[in-house]
Amino acid sequence: CMFFFLMIRRPPRSTLFPYPTLFRSINSRIDIFMLGILSTSGQVGIYGLALLIAGVVAMPQTVVNAIIAPRIARLHATGNREELQRLVSVGGRISFVVALVILVGVFFVGKPVVVFVVGEEFVPSWLVAMVLSVGFTFMVALGPVTPVLLMTGKESTMSRIVWMVAILNALLNFILIQFYGAIGAGIATVVARIVSETGLWYFVRKKTGIRCDVLFRVRIPVKMNTDSGRT
């Protein structure tokens, strides 16, 4: 009820900050919730393990976002857009490189590790984890869109995107879980989250002029030594 109340009633700007986190929390639980209703407990266990494995891929971005978020707010408040762009780009690239390394690790050693730790019956978790990990890596490549939107006062935009994507996530999970079980939940979740992050990336660029993705090239100024030619 609270979810639909927040959708209908537009709250004051000052109270919007917790809502993106609330909507994202709801969105991140839809797959497990619907898998538990529409499939078996075995599929839930497989998917739960896959989420744990894939979550390691997204962890670098979570850590980097927590570190750079306060500085994003300060740079935005002082109007230092050039330094803000540089911070976002460097942070995004660090997150992406580490996530990519972890993705490669999951691909090559994930399956034998799953067999060794929990047994052959959980091998399907590795395939689901790969689907989730590839999707998470793509999202990391879009950069730290969440802290940029939140720390620049665009939390209402983020809230609208996230709750609309939550509906898409629920619909996709409802359809795909019935046919493909845990792997269907993984595909639905990845598609919904990519749509969400792409939308956030677009609005960051539109409303702030900041490019968060790793493809954006930032010029790092080089100071020339004017005394080098003096004798």
Image (spheres, helix red, strand yellow):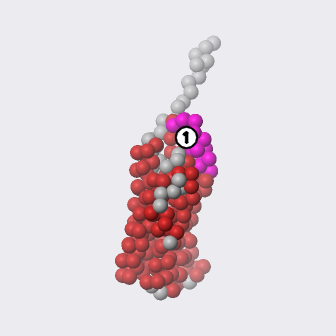
Residue beneath the point at 54% across and 66% down: 25
Return the residue found at the far top: 231
Q: Amino acid at mark 1?
A: His
Q: Is residue 109 above or below residue 11?
A: below
Residue 8 position by quadrant: bottom left
User: Is residue 122 one of those drawn in magenta?
Assistant: no
Residue 174 x, y percent position in the rendering: 39, 77
Residue 204 relative to residue 91: left or right: left
Q: Is residue 208 left or right of residue 231?
A: left
Query: Which image quarter: residue 78?
Result: top right
Please tell me which residue is depicted at 38% across the width and 72% down the height of the picture.
172
Looking at the image, is 146 positioned above or below residue 184?
above
Q: Nearer the viewer, residue 142 or 15?
A: 15
Magenta residues, start to end: 67-81
Residue of label 1: 76
Residue at the image point whose x is 50% and y is 72% from the top: 1
Q: Nearer the viewer, residue 7 or 205?
A: 7
Name the residue located 57 percent from the left edge and 39 percent from the top edge.
77
Pick whichever, 201 or 12, lies toward us: 12
Res 208 visible: yes
The foreground one among 177 and 4 is 4
Dominant secondary structure (helix, strand or loop) of the stretch shown in magenta: helix
